[in-house]
């Protein structure tokens, strides 16, 4: 029971990270129907930016931890957004309206490019960082096994809830969100009634990048080890999460992320840690077989 | 145009380039502006702002030159370059048979020419493996229009099935080759059956996941696959069970040079590998060319263009796609077992996602569905990085960048001239949408 609870906590924190990345996939897929293959790399860049911000802050003489976290959060979001915007502008916008596979190939190229760019700039070795937030609550103890809920996990979960609320409000209440939903439904029609489609799509990429940056910051704090290759696997799992939750649906992406995190945590807790990725992808295949629209997705009607 | 107008124009260009430079600086600041390194286990950062400055200046100058150039000569130049690539495509299309015969003759003469040495033959074999994989994937992506991002998994299945059968059961290459193909094809069926009913994008991600699953399993199933150590001393193929390529007789088979009554040369073995993969690749090509004319081939191309129409005509989409998927996987299996026997050593490292990406890039850049395009793209994409091997670090960087640039410049592939095999007169469909 205690072990189960501990894995539940770990799984939820991991799932929050996947969910944040998954939102980027689901929003982009919803609006232009394309798998943004380089999104995992954007997340990796977010992780690097936040790590470097922490290092620079330490170099300048340490500051109060919450302030450091806030600065790192803002820095990571700002710079990663610029990266996300540039990627869209250079690699995807010229291909809008081209045939279906073109942007995908371009995205794969972009992903390879960004991975190797970071490798060239920051080296191929893993970057270990001192843990910044340590300690936590001891929830219960039984037979020498303590269930802990670390401050970091609380931080991750609260930040995720806050961001999710903000983003849901943006999508549902603001004119930007309305423009996004209009573009998603019918791009031509949206353009006709005065929505700046190009800018709306750019904003979608930027919003996805901002959330990916937060995920990158969390993973830097949570694992303390990052390298240029982390984006590939995380991106793939996040996409799995987006599909699991029903692609195009924001709450679905979060739900999918949490489920993927839980599956991963329980699988590595009770079975073998080596095959946790296999478990995740097998779940993906099963979901696609039995519920192709995902858990919260709307069925798609094909029209001639 | 008045002088004043021109001056304003210039200012606008400068401003535009300035913004581009600023963005480049912002992009570079966190990633290039600081160097991170370990000091006694503690990570530290060190500023190197001159890198940011260089990035900004290069972008500024580059952007300015390009936009100035676009006003004057560059637009006509790039248009000319675009149309010349297009006309090369058209030229190739027109002279396809001649070109194919030329390429084939060159390929046959090559090992006997003075250019042939161990190194060049090795490279040629390497390129031919990718040509074969490209042709195999072309069936799936080019003909059937299914996006397979995990093609390398079938290649791995082929390689490991040959390696395991040969090392554990002592079976010869010629028995294992078809078996490897069958194994790979059955994996294709097992994987394809549940997911081919779904829309294309899901297939992409499932195949991607499958590629990763195969790699993880190969890495961790230590007792069978040797994990990260891989499988070594995989037996070499014999000359169709009649001779071996060593100086002396082995396993009761005479050496090749005695059988053929020629002088012994270490090159013989490499020439044999070369022809082996050439024949395998040509079989793939011939098969594709023929099957396009059969009902099932026609159905693949029809499905690629319009699935709903096909369903109404009574074509079973799942089964039809499944055949394409399985046949593509089978050729990857053949190529994999050749790879295993040539290398003599395989490990999961040879079957990473990047291989799938390279093969897919070959198919797409070659202009999907074009057989000659695949050959040219394979030569460019495989030999190109090989030539700059000294710049190891920048190799993949340039590869990724080139993929994006080529897609933006010519989204239909370098030699795009795909046309339907059957066409009604006077009807020309613009783009194929989604």
Image (spheres, coloured by chain):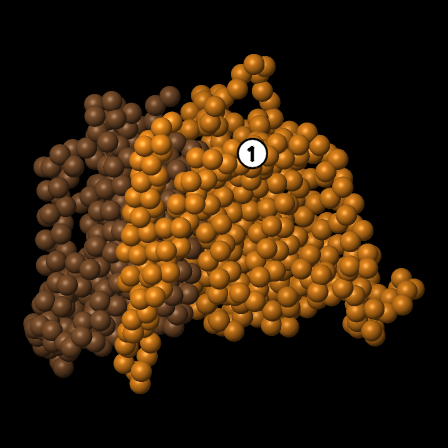
Chain colours: A brown, B orange
Residue drawn 27% across the image and 41% down it: A202
In this picture, residue B353 sits left or right of residue B385: left
Relative depth, front residue between A216 and B352: A216
In this picture, residue B337 sits left or right of residue A155: right
Residue B311 spot, x, y in % from top left: 45, 25
Residue drawn 57% across the image and 16% down it: B424
Which chain letter matches label 1? B
In this picture, residue B286 sits left or right of residue A103: right
Relative depth, front residue between B315 and B159: B159
Label 1, secondary structure: give it. helix
Is residue A2 visible in the rendered image? The answer is no
* Mark 1 Cα-neighbour bin, 10 Å: few <14, some 14–19, many ≥20: few
In the figure, A86 relative to A59: above or below?
above
Residue B407 spot, x, y in % from top left: 47, 42
Relative depth, front residue between B6 and B50: B6
In the figure, A285 relative to A48: above or below?
above
Q: Quadrant of residue A230?
A: bottom left
In this picture, residue B25 sits left or right of residue A193: right
Residue drawn 32% across the image and 32% down it: B4
Q: Quadrant of the N terminus of chain B?
A: top left
Q: Which residue is mark 1?
A: B80
Q: Quadrant of the C terminus of chain B?
A: top left
Residue B54 spot, x, y in % from top left: 37, 60
Residue A119 spot, x, y in % from top left: 40, 65
In the figure, A254 relative to B345: above or below?
above
Relative depth, front residue between A90 and A138: A90
Residue furthest to the top in view is B426
Is residue B270 visible in the rendered image? The answer is yes
Residue furthest to the right in view is B261
């Amino acid at each position: 029971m205690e072990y189960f609870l501990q894995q539940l906590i770990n799984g939820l924190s991991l799932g929050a990270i996947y969910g944040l990345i998954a939102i980027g996939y689901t929003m982009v897929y919803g609006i232009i129907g394309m798998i943004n293959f380089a999104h995992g790399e954007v997340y990796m860049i977010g992780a690097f930016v936040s790590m470097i911000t922490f290092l620079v802050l330490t170099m300048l003489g340490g500051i109060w931890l919450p302030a450091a976290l806030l600065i790192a959060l803002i820095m990571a979001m700002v710079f990663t957004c610029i990266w996300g915007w540039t990627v869209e502008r250079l690699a995807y916008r010229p291909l809008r309206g081209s045939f279906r596979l073109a942007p995908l190939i371009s995205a794969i190229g972009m992903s390879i490019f960004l991975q190797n760019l970071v490798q060239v700039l920051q080296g191929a070795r893993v970057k270990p960082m001192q843990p910044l937030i340590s300690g936590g609550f001891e929830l219960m103890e039984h037979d020498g096994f303590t269930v802990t809920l670390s401050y970091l996990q609380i931080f991750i979960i609260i930040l995720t809830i806050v961001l999710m609320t903000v983003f849901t409000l943006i999508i549902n209440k603001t004119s930007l969100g309305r423009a996004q939903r209009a573009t998603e439904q019918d791009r031509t029609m949206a353009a006709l009634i005065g929505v700046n489609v190009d800018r709306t799509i750019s904003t979608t990429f930027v919003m996805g990048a901002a959330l990916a940056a937060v995920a990158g910051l969390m993973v830097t704090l949570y694992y303390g080890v990052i390298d240029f290759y982390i984006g590939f696997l995380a991106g793939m799992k996040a996409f799995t999460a987006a599909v699991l939750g029903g692609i195009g649906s924001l709450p679905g992406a979060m739900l999918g992320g949490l489920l993927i995190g839980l599956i991963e945590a329980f699988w590595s807790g009770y079975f073998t840690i080596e095959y946790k990725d296999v478990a995740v992808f097998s779940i993906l295949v099963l979901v696609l077989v039995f519920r192709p629209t995902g858990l919260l997705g709307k069925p798609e009607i094909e029209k001639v | 145009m008045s002088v004043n107008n021109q001056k304003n124009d210039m200012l606008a260009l400068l401003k535009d380039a300035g913004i581009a430079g600023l963005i480049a600086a912002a992009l570079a600041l966190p990633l290039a502006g600081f160097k991170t390194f370990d000091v006694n286990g503690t990570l530290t950062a060190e500023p190197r702002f001159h890198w940011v400055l260089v990035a900004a200046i290069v972008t500024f100058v580059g952007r300015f030159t390009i936009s100035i150039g676009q006003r004057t000569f560059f637009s006509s130049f790039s248009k000319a370059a675009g149309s010349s690539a297009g006309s090369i495509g058209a030229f190739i299309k027109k002279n396809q048979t001649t070109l194919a015969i030329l390429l084939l003759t060159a390929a046959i003469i090559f090992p006997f020419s003075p250019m042939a040495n161990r190194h060049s033959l090795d490279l040629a074999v390497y390129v031919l493996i990718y040509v074969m994989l490209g042709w195999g994937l072309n069936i799936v992506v080019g003909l059937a229009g299914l996006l397979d991002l995990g093609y390398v998994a079938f290649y791995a299945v082929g390689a490991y099935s040959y390696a395991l059968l040969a090392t554990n059961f002592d079976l010869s290459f010629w028995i294992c080759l078809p078996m490897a193909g069958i194994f790979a094809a059955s994996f294709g069926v097992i994987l394809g059956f549940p997911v081919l009913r779904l829309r294309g994008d899901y297939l992409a991600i499932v195949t991607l996941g499958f590629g990763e699953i195969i790699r993880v399993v190969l890495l961790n199933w230590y007792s069978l696959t040797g994990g990260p150590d891989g499988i070594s001393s995989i037996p070499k193929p014999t000359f169709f069970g009649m001779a071996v390529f060593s100086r002396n007789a082995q396993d009761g088979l005479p050496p090749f040079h005695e059988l053929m009554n020629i002088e012994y040369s270490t090159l013989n073995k490499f020439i044999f590998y070369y022809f082996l993969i050439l024949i395998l690749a040509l079989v793939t090509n011939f098969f594709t060319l023929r099957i396009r004319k059969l009902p099932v081939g026609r159905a693949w191309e029809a499905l690629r263009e319009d699935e709903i129409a096909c369903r109404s005509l009574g074509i079973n989409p799942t089964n039809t796609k499944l055949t394409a998927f399985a046949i593509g996987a089978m050729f990857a299996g053949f190529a994999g077992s050749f790879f295993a026997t040539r290398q003599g050593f395989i490990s999961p490292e040879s079957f990473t996602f990047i291989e799938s990406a390279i093969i897919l890039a070959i198919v797409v850049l070659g202009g999907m569905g074009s057989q000659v395009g695949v050959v040219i793209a394979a030569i460019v994409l495989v030999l190109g990085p090989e030539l700059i091997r000294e710049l190891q670090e920048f190799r993949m960087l340039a590869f990724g960048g080139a993929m994006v640039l080529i897609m933006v410049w010519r989204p239909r592939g370098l030699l795009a001239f795909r046309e339907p095999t059957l066409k009604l007169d006077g009807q020309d469909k613009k783009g194929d949408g989604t």
